[in-house]
Structure formats: structure tokens, C-alpha cells
Amino acid sequence: MQKQRDRIDLTGRDYTAIYALSDIHGCHDQMVEAEGRIAEDARDLPGRKLLMYLGDYVDRGPCSSDVLAHLSAPPPAGFDRYALCGNHDDVFLRFLDDPDANSHWLEFGALPTLASYGVDARRLLVEEDHSIGELRDIVVKAMPPAHIDLLRALAGAVTFGPILFVHAGIRPGIALNDQTDEDLMWIREPFLSEGPQLPLLVIHGHTPSSHPVFGQGRIGIDTAVSMGGTLTVLKIVDGRPTILSSI
């Protein structure tokens, strides 16, 4: 059984700006371009800046391995960076830990992830009749250990004063300490319609939309980049959120 992921409190840190992105899903080029725009926007801002990634780095898109490599490297100069765990990242790790119990990941947009490591899952399973466990062993050998370490280290939530960053949302009206990782990574309703029901502004991804959603006590920034949409960058300065760019 996996231990609960970290819930990190950054309240009191002196960040002049916060930038948040979510649901990269293997779209490495768009992520790098977004970081470039963030760096340009922040160039004349004094002090440290915070870069928040809200999860789902793998599956669907073509370059999951490059995304994990990028997040395993140091952040841009002048930035602190925190990466949260999305449901896709969590299921990928669960497959690596217990492939027989988590083979459903292979139908979860996983084949492009494996292909990004040079692993052709259909050929191995169908044409060469490998077992799920053998496939897992091949995947682990193909992955840099730093990528697996990153998946294990991804946090469940980050709090900055009255702002909460999570992948999916929270159960309305329930204190953060009583939320499960499954809540933070998987929830949709009733969070989407009711909001947090707490004195918080929740910044999240997970539920794709054609545009950022400014809801009741929440801002959803998954704009489906891996499905032909855009990659939204949310900027927060002095508690005021704006959309920096959609690319």
C-alpha cells in the first residue's frame, strides 16, 4: 500500500508571482514553450517565483519520458518548482509496483507513454506473448531511475495562504487533512458544482475544458492540450489570478 503523498504548506514564503500549469500529458514541446513564456513574463519581477505543476505528466501525448526528464532537472533560475501527482501519474506508478493488479493502466492512454521509452507494448503482449509482469520488467529497465523517483516523490497538494493547488479538487467542506489522495487526484462531482465549501481558492486540473473555468471557489486550468486544445498558464500576483497565455 502506498503511503499518503505529501501535503506541503508554503504559506509565508515570499513569492512575487505564482505560475500554474496542469495536465501536460506527454506534450513536452508545449510545456517547454510555456515555461519560456513564463520566464519572459517573470524576467523583470524581483525575488523568487513559484512554478506549480498540477499533475498528469504522462499518457496520451507522445513525449511522456521527456516531460518526466524535464521535471527531474532543476527548475528555471529564480524559480521554486513543485510538481503534484495526477491520477495518470499515480496509476503508472502503481503499474510499476504491481502490474497484475494495475494492468488497466494499459487502456488508460498508456501506450504512448511506453512508446516514449522505446517499449512497444502491443508487440510484446500480443505478438511475443509476454506476460504483464515481463512487460513491467522491460519498462523498468527502459526508464531512468530518476523518473521513477520523481513519480514517488510527487506531492498530493500545496497550500499557499488561502490558495490550494491540487490535481483534481477536494471533497466540499472537508478539511485538507481528512482528504484522501484519491479525493485530491480523482474527484469531479460534487466539487465541480459546489466548489470547496471552505475559505480556499482551489487551483486544479483533471477536468478538461475548452477554456479555463473560473468557478465557485475554484479555477480549473486543464484545457486539453493532449487532445488538440491548449496549455493554459495561470498567473497569480498578490492573490489575483489572471491567464498569462494559452498556447
Image (spheres, rainbow, N blue to C red):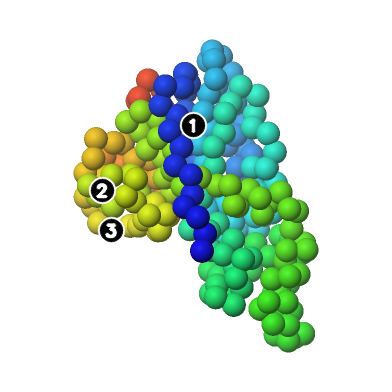
Tell me the CA gap for discs 3 and 2.
Answer: 14 Å
Marks 1,2: beta carbons within 8 A: no
Q: Residues within 10 Å of mark 3 (few under 14, many from 20)?
A: few
Kindly identify which numbered label has been placed on residue 19. 1
Disc ID at residue 189: 3
Q: Secondary structure at mark 1?
A: strand
Q: Residue 227: image x %, image y %?
A: 51, 58
Identify which amino acid the numbered label 1 is placed on.
Tyr
In the figure, 162 relative to 156: above or below? above
User: Is residue 43 in sight in this rendering?
Assistant: yes
Question: Residue 233: percent from the left, percent from the top?
Answer: 48, 36
Q: Quadrant of residue 207?
A: bottom left
Q: Secondary structure at mark 3?
A: loop
Q: Residues within 10 Å of mark 2 (few under 14, many from 20)?
A: few
Q: Which mark is residue 173?
A: none
Residue underneath mark 2: 174
Pick whichever of labels 1 and 3 is earlier in the sequence: 1
Residue 197: x, y in percent? 21, 44
Task: Look at discs 1 and 2 and give the one toward the viewer.
Answer: 2
- Residue 247 vs residue 84, the one in the foreground: 84
Q: Amino acid at mark 2?
A: Ile
Q: Residue at x 46, y 22 (%)?
A: 13
What is the quadrant of residue 73 in the picture?
top right
Which residue is at a point 55% across and 20% down the rendered structure image? 48
Q: Single out the mark in the foreground, 3 or 2.
A: 2
Q: Are marks 3 and 2 in contact (CB under 8 Å)?
A: no
* Label 1 vs 2, first from the N-terminus: 1
